[in-house]
Image (cartoon, rainbow, N blue to C red):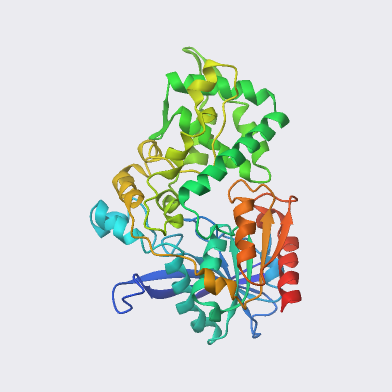
């Protein structure tokens, strides 16, 4: 362990050893990293623990500077563990560089089946007694971290004192197809709202798309296509995302001796926004997090998109329709254009074809839940369907919701202490 100080916070880096396969506890072991955070004036106190599970899948826990965002509020009364879920951050990372150590694509796909919420929860249950002495702890789950928290309630509620969920109540029984059929209309609404705010972007997006349909570009090995450009709509799910997208579009073109071209500034911004180099598990496992009914996900977002022809860029350009951006969806072409994903294309295909996914949620146990649970549900959340979330909320005994349109999906980051205060008040009213 190593400790160091930030303004108002003392961080301690911790490493834990857990089984790769929890059904074989004496088999291969992997390392999981967590960063403990405690208020600088309370380092010697016996404080209750709160474990934070980041959104994703595929993202390590946020790297905080001091007491920013919600961490300062949490540190007023908790000792916080910022957990890098297995395969992310410093927790035995899984990416194009490390996965070949497992063997070929089939071995890699088999390995990655152990990186879903069921394994993450079992990691937590091995780590918890090492920190709490066996006492239950509070879980704060953001987005996919909330999916993990619902799995926790299904599999090991005895380890939980309370559960706080922000933008992360999963559909309990929906196939990935159901998730994306609900998603595309939400994305279309977000795009319409963006164009209403910035009407000049309608023509800009058409011009950029038309250019890319004729001239796909390459930036540092990353191939930018019209579909890749459309995928920038993922930005529209955040509170400031519409503004960020507008600023990205405004300097797309530059005049050169060879005519009008896409500017280096624009291409680099797009590459940065769309590369999966820092979070490849997001692409590899994004649909697998819904797999549990013996049906393959089979590139669900790609197949379901065909049911919404208004998202086809070429068709939009033939008429006078605006080009629609897409959102939180992964497609086969991602594994062709992104150098961080290209070596993992066959592995991704094997995961998409897989049918032996284990069930994730125990509806009977959730219906009999005894753990205080509060969830922030963001009205018209682009990433997690509100109707699905509220149906799940009604299926978990005692769960209390705060439905708000004050924040988008990133409300925990944007609202920080206020969001955390609201959820803590709800679970304490229920205790």
Residue 13 seen from this side:
no
Determine the residue positioned at 67% across, 56% down: 377
Viewer-closest of 397 and 244? 397
Quadrant of residue 224 within the rendered picture = top left
At a point 72% along the width and 56% down the height, the residue shown is: 403
Q: In which quadrant will I find the C terminus?
A: bottom right
Position of residue 401 in the picture relative to residue 281 (left or right): right
In the image, 236: left or right of 288?
right
- Would you identify the image quadrant in which residue 38 lies? bottom right
The residue closer to the viewer here, 308 or 341, is 308
| Residue 186 point in image, percent of width and height | 61, 41
Please provide percent x and percent y for residue 295: 37, 53
Q: Give the left or right position of residue 420, taking residue 126 as reference.
A: right
Q: Observer-nearest residue: 421 or 62?
A: 421
> Residue furthest toward the left?
103
Q: Is residue 294 above or below residue 218?
A: below
Give the mark count: 0
From the viewer's perspective, is residue 158 above or below residue 218?
below
Answer with left or right where residue 19 lies relative to residue 59. Answer: left
> Residue 133's spot in the image, x, y percent?
53, 87
Q: Is residue 201 above or below residue 333?
A: above
Relative to 311, residue 380 above or below: below
Whether residue 325 is visible to the viewer of this picture, yes or no, is yes
Residue 77 drawn at (x, y percent): 70, 76
Q: Give the quarter of the image for residue 371.
A: bottom right
């Amino acid at each position: 362990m190593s400790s160091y100080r930030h303004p108002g916070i003392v961080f301690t880096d911790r490493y834990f050893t857990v089984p790769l396969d929890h059904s074989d506890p004496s088999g291969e072991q992997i390392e999981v990293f967590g960063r403990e955070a405690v208020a600088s004036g309370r380092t010697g106190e016996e404080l209750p623990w709160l474990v934070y599970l980041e959104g994703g899948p595929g993202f390590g826990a946020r790297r905080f500077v001091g007491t920013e965002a919600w961490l300062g509020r949490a540190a007023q009364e908790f000792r916080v563990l910022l957990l890098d879920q297995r395969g992310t951050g410093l927790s035995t990372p899984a990416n194009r560089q490390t996965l070949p150590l497992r063997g070929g694509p089939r071995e890699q796909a088999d390995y990655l089946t152990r990186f879903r919420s069921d394994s993450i929860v079992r990691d937590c249950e091995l780590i918890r007694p090492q920190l709490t002495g066996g006492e239950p702890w509070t879980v704060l789950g953001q987005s996919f971290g909330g999916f993990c928290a619902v799995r926790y309630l299904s599999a090991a509620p005895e380890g939980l004192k309370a559960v706080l969920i922000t933008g992360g109540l999963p559909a309990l029984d929906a196939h990935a197809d159901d998730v994306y059929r609900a998603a595309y209309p939400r994305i279309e609404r977000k795009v319409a709202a963006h164009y209403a705010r910035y009407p000049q972007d309608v023509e800009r997006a058409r011009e950029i798309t038309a250019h890319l349909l004729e001239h796909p570009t390459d930036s540092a090995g990353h191939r930018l296509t019209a579909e890749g450009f459309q995928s920038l709509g993922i930005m529209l799910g955040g509170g400031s995302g519409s503004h960020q997208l507008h600023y990205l579009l405004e300097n797309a073109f530059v005049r050169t001796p060879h005519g009008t071209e896409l500017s280096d500034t624009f291409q680099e911004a797009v590459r940065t926004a769309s590369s999966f180099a820092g979070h490849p598990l997001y692409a590899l496992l994004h649909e697998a997090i819904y797999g549990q009914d013996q049906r393959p996900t089979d590139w669900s977002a790609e197949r379901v998109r065909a049911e919404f022809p208004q998202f086809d860029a070429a068709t939009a350009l033939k008429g006078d329709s605006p080009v629609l951006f897409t959102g939180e969806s992964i497609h086969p072409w991602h594994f062709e254009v992104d150098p961080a994903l290209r070596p993992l294309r066959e592995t991704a295909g094997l995961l998409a074809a897989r049918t032996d996914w284990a069930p994730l949620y125990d509806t009977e146990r959730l219906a009999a839940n005894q753990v205080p649970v509060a969830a922030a549900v963001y009205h018209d959340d682009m990433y997690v369907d509100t109707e699905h979330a509220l149906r799940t909320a009604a299926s978990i005994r005692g769960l209390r919701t705060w439905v708000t349109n004050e924040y988008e999906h990133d409300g925990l980051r944007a609202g920080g202490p206020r969001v955390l205060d609201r959820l803590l008040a709800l679970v304490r009213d229920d205790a």
